[in-house]
Amino acid sequence: MTQLNESCRLSRIAPRTDADRVVLLVPERNIETWLAYLNGAAVDETTSYPKLPEPSRCQEHVRVLADMCGGGQLRQPAPQSLVAACGEYGNVFR
């Protein structure tokens, strides 16, 4: 997020505001951390988790994430970057 804001500043592009209906989902390490978490694993944001065999297999993970974020209930402990992502989701879809 810091890099995005700095890039906007350097490019003289106005940074995103609360009025913009944009959700930024930024994992700390990679998306596989979130997928492992959504699959029920206990995760940390420093470990490298395996990729899905086929990217299209993430649909169930997306449904789980939408349910968790929409209900405001992430299973604990949740990765901090996913907590922030759900906050983003709530800012746009409430």
Image: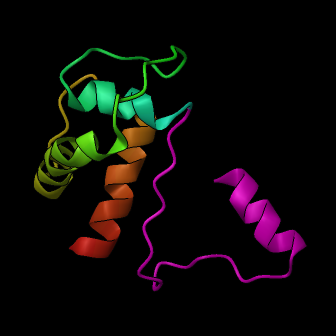
Asked if the magenta segment contains residue 39, the reply would be no
**Closest to the observer, 56 or 90:** 56
Q: Is residue 29 left or right of residue 93?
A: right
**Closest to the observer, 65 or 91:** 65
User: How many discs appear?
Assistant: 0
As drawn, the residue found furthest toward the front would be 54
Residue at 72% x, 83% y is 14
Residue at 42% x, 67% y is 23
Tell me: residue 81, above or below residue 79.
Answer: below
Tell me: residue 76, above or below residue 47.
Answer: below
Quarter of the picture holding the C terminus: bottom left
Asked if the magenta segment contains residue 20, the reply would be yes
Magenta highlight range: 1-28
List x then y, in percent, for residue 85: 39, 51
**Closest to the observer, 63 or 12:** 63
Residue at 25% x, 40% y is 57
Tell me: residue 76, above or below residue 58.
Answer: above
